[in-house]
Amino acid sequence: MKNKDAAVVVFSGGQDSTTCLLYAIKKYKKVYAISFDYNQRHKLELECAKNICEELNVEHEILDMKLLAQLAPNSLTRADIEVDHDAPETGTPNSFVDGRNMIFLTFVAVYAKQRGVTDIITGVSQSDFSGYPDCRDIFIKSLNTTINLAMDYEFDIITPLMWIDKEETWEMADKLGGFELVRDKTLTCYNGIIGDGCGDCPSCKLRRKGLDAYLKRRRQ
Ligand code: ZN
């Protein structure tokens, strides 16, 4: 039996996935959040994810994906590799983890099917394209077809942020009543500082630019 009243959210504890979690809570009766331990540089990320789920009363599970760091060491899993500040002209930035979204979404699909759930929510976005090929809509559609065929099941990968930028993501969190939560409790900073972050890394700059633009509009 398929449960259309429930959804599984791919949840990192960052701004985007927390906004997706708020979206899911509004839309579904039952929400599961899944985080991944892939030996990311900042364990605090998982701590943040856990705390947000507790606060929002969402069932949360952390899956062990350390194998990924073993296969594809990169700047998000290795402290001795510095994060690229700009997307390179060719190829992917060194913060890109080969296969990450494909592997995570595939595991989430297995988890969802076990619970009779078809709807999978992920916060990937093509708008602020940062050179990550697995954040593109075409990849998500392709994987959706693949997992449906692989498991003979009608999954629906839902991407509420695909066509919106950071400013609109702030707006969405605000409309869902989670502006403060996202601002104060999420972790997106590559230097592992919760909330407004270090202010200097590419992720903080993108987040800040969107926030400033949204706040300016909000005050008017
Ligand atoms: Zn930062």
Image (cartoon, helix red, strand yellow):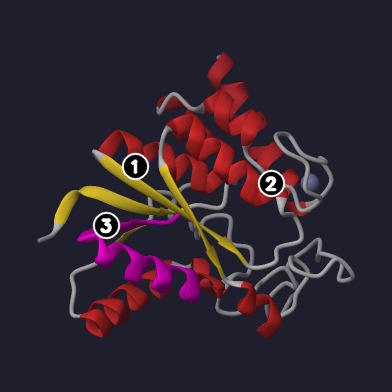
Magenta span has 106?
Answer: yes
Q: In the image, is 63 to the left or to the right of 25? A: right
Q: Name the image quarter holding residue 137.
A: bottom left
The residue identified by callout 3 is 119
Q: Amino acid at mark 1?
A: Ala
Location of residue 69 with respect to 128 vertically, above or below: below
The residue located at (47%, 75%) in the rendering is: 102
Label located before the other in sequence (1 or 3): 1
- The range drawn in magenta is 102-123
The residue identified by callout 2 is 206
Q: Kindly give the residue lying farthest to the top in the view shown.
A: 220
Q: Is residue 171 visible?
A: no
Could you tell me how far apart the alpha carbons at marks 3 and 2 are, in whole angstroms? 29 Å
Location of residue 190 with respect to 19 vertically, above or below: below
140 vs 65, nearest the viewer? 65
Q: Amino acid at mark 3?
A: Asp
The residue located at (81%, 64%) in the rendering is: 83
Q: Name the image quarter holding residue 181.
A: top right
Label 3 near ligand 1 (CB < 8 Å)? no
The residue identified by callout 1 is 24
Label located before the other in sequence (2 or 1): 1
